[in-house]
Amino acid sequence: MSLAVTIVAWLLAAFVIVVGVAHLVTPAKVEPLVPEWWPAKRATVYTSGVAEVVIGIGLLVPATRTWAAGVAMLMFLAYTLVHLDDLRHTSRATRASDTTGGVITRGVVNLAYAGLALFVCLG
């Protein structure tokens, strides 16, 4: 595995672990990102937090890096779809990240993360 892949894997791991811990420590801040129609928001936030920490650890371990990168890519793509669902609600935005531009930006950023995960996955 190249040095570039290792560096990207470690950076993604750090990001995903920090975000996962944030889900677990401050779930009320993350819950607004869960679509209003989705059941069990708090359980979803906790579950995704644990999943992100596990994926992050997997990215750090060379033997599980490819698997973890593939799962991370799918996770980022799923989050992109969730963010795009928010486009239905931009007219009542109270934060910049909830405006049309903010929602599109979140989607693009998640696609970039998915691209980095794909880079790691392909090694």
Image (cartoon, rainbow, N blue to C red):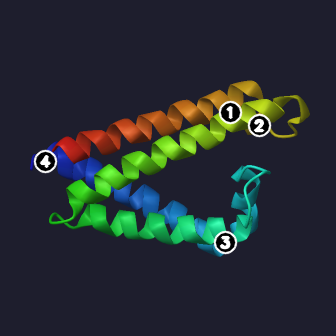
Mark 1 and mark 2 in contact? Answer it, CB < 8 Å: yes
Query: Badge 4, how many Cα within 10 Å: few under 14, some, many 20+?
Result: few
User: Where does residue 9 sit, x and y in percent of width and height?
Assistant: 27, 53
Sooner in the amino-acid sequence: mark 3 or mark 4: 4
- Residue 103 is marked as 1
Mark 2 highlights which residue? Answer: 98
Label located before the other in sequence (4 or 1): 4
- Of badges 4 and 2, the one in the foreground is 2
- Eye-nearest disc, 4 or 1: 1
- Element under label 3? helix
Q: Name the residue under label 4.
A: 3
In whole angstroms, how far apart are the C-alphas of marks 4 and 1? 33 Å
The percent coordinates of residue 1 (x first, y second) are 9, 50
Instruction: Please name which of the two marks, 1 or 3, marks the residue nearer to the observer.
Output: 3
Report, in whole angstroms, how far the alpha carbon at label 1 lies from the one at label 2: 6 Å
Of the two numbered discs 1 and 3 on the same chain, state the one appearing first in sequence. 3
> Could you tell me residue 73's position as x and y percent?
38, 46
Residue ID at (19%, 46%) = 5
Q: Mark 3 points at which residue?
A: 43
Along the polypeptide, which appears first: circle 1 or circle 2?
2
* 7 left or right, relative to 11: left
Residue at horizontal 22%, vertical 59%? Answer: 65
Q: How far apart are marks 3 and 4 (CA)?
A: 37 Å
